[in-house]
Amino acid sequence: MRLDALLFETRFEGCRQHERIELKLPGRYMLRDRVEYSCWTIDVSPNGLALAIEGDEKGQIGDPVVAYINQLGRIEGVLVRQLHKGFAVKVLAPANKTEKLAARIAGVIDNQMFGAPGARLEGLAPDGGLTTLTTPDGVECLATVIDISNQGAAINVETAPPIGSRVTVGRKWARVVRHFAGGIAVTFQGRLREPTL
C-alpha cells in the first residue's frame, strides 16, 4: 500500500487544522507590490506554510500573499507571522482546493520517500514486515512495515502516537508526520543506512 493512497488524515492540534510537515521546495512569492521574489518552503500544510526568503521583502501582517511553489502550484493566503528570515502564511482557499493541495503535499512526500530510483530499500522489514515501535512514553508495541525507504516508512500500528512525536522504529529514531487509517507515516532522523531495522 503506497503512501500516495493515504491522504492527509491529520489531527487538529492546537490552533492548526493540519500539522505542518517539514518540506524544502523552491518557489516565488508576491506581496502587495506584485513584484516576484525568490523563496523556499520551511514547512507546509494544506492550511498554511512558512517561507524562507533571501531578501528583506517580508511584508506586513495581514498582507495578501501569492506564492508559486514548485510541485505545489499557486497558493494564495495572508501573512500571519513574521519569522527571522521569512514569514508564515495562512492559506485562503475553498475546501476543494485545500483537498487538492493536501493531495499534492502527500504526493511530494511520497515521491521523496519512495519515488526516487533506488530509494526503496528492499529487505528492510524483518520477519515478514514485523518490527517494534516504541512510543515517546517508552511503551513498545508490535508494528508492521507497509513501505520503507532510507528516509521514512509507512507502518501499521494499533495505537497511533500523536503527529510530531519522536518514536523508535526497530532501532531507528523517527518522527511521526502523518496518520492514516490503521497506521502512521514516519520520517527517519537521519537517512537509513542499516541493512535492517
Image: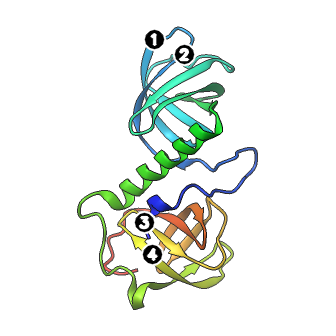
Could you say whether the residue bearing mark 1 is in a helix, strand or loop?
A: loop
User: Which residue in the protein does label 1 denote?
Assistant: 35
- Cα distance in 3D space between marks 2 and 4: 43 Å
Q: How is the image coloured?
A: rainbow
Residue in front for this viewpoint, 146 or 126: 146
Residue tagged by mark 2? Answer: 31
The mark closer to the camera, 3 or 1, is 3
Instruction: Using the numbered discs, state the Cα–Cα distance from disc 1 to disc 4 in whole angstroms.
Output: 45 Å
Q: CA distance from mark 3 to mark 2?
A: 38 Å
Q: Are marks 3 and 1 in contact (CB under 8 Å)?
A: no
Q: Which residue was labeled with disc 4?
A: 146
Q: Quadrant of the C terminus?
A: bottom left
Q: Earlier in the sequence, mark 1 or mark 4?
A: 1
Q: Mark 3 sits on what residue? A: 2
Q: Residue at x 35, y 62 (%)?
A: 114
- The secondary element bearing badge 3 is classed as loop
Q: Residue furthest front?
A: 96
Label 2 vs label 4, nearer the camera: 4
